[in-house]
Image (cartoon, rainbow, N blue to C red):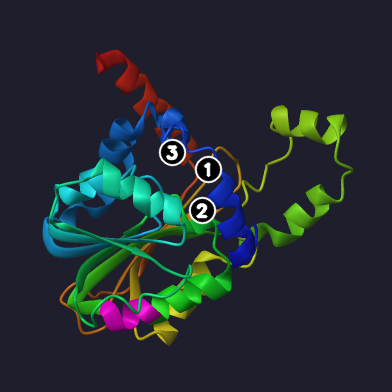
Amino acid sequence: MGTLSENEAFWARYDWSRAGEEWSEGWGGSHAQWHGVILPRIARFLPTGSMLEIAPGYGRWTGYLLEQCEALTIVDLDDACIEACRKRFAGDDRLSFHVNDGRSLEMIEDESVDFAFSFDSLVHADEGVIVHYLRELGRKLTPDGVGFIHHSNAGRYRRYFALTDSIPRGRVRERLYNLRVLDRPRWRALDMTAKRFRESCESAGLQCISQEVVNWTTRRLIDCFSIFTRPASHWARPNRILVNSGFVSEARAIKRRAQLYSP
């Protein structure tokens, strides 16, 4: 996991020739991943009015989100990503585009966002970035607004990754990774966990209502999907937590179905 400046530098030089589709290969493509993974987890909040997507990259999920809202604002720290989205969705006046500093939402009107979304992006964001975004969303969400953020839980295994990192880099460590004896940290933030996210929501005047802790091509549960809202929202309820160690198996099943029914 890198700092905010390291993230900015990394994504600025990243090869976006596949528009991020390479990250959906494990599910059989972004269409299969959207319908098999993402939509079932957020369907109860859709369709909606005003939506915000944080860190869309080249718009892998943006088109699907557009089908579920009246207006969509996308915010990314990388100029090239926003420009690519402008071209990809040119002519759709439901969309507005903004480049930010990687943590600010000052361009968004307060209490104007019905649904905030980020998937497969903020897993790389450290605790400071997550805390700042949640503080912003504490002001930007409508009274019944909801957020869905995919973030890191790798901090739960910080000692483990420190131990694996002590193994000298080279063939031995790479072989242990390839044999799945060791889990790769997948460039996840090692200072963020489901618990810290939940506490950060509370500090921002929000509350988690669902958290699903999952593995991500790993045995360890290094990721988390968190859904949150305001305490007075009609969606508010005590938080429910699911430890889903079978998420990787679900991905394989989704991919098999996608291959069976694809053109």
What residue is pinned by disc 1? 216
Are dots 2 and 3 in contact, CB under 8 Å? no
Find numbered disc 2 in the image and state the secondary structure of the residue it sits on.
strand
Is residue 136 toward the left or the right of residue 9 in the image? left
Left or right, residue 51 beside residue 138 = left
Q: Position of residue 188 (x, y in %)?
A: 60, 54
Give the residue at mark 3: 20
- Outermost residue, right direction? 168
Q: Amino acid at mark 1?
A: Trp
Q: Which residue is mark 2?
A: 223
The magenta span reads: 136-140
| Residue contact between numbered discs 1 and 2, judged by CB atoms under 8 Å | yes
Q: Is residue 229 above or below residue 1?
A: below
100 versus 16 height, above or below: below
Name the residue rendered at 45%, 40% in the picture.
Answer: 247
On whether residue 138 falls in the magenta region, the answer is: yes
Specify the amino acid type for callout 2.
Asp
**Would you call the spot at circle 1 few (<14 residues within 10 Å), some (14-19), or many (20 or more)?**
many
At horizontal 60% and vertical 41% (from top left) the residue drawn is 219
The residues tagged by marks 1 and 3 sit, at their Cα atoms, a distance apart of 17 Å
Q: Nearer the viewer, residue 232 or 94?
A: 94
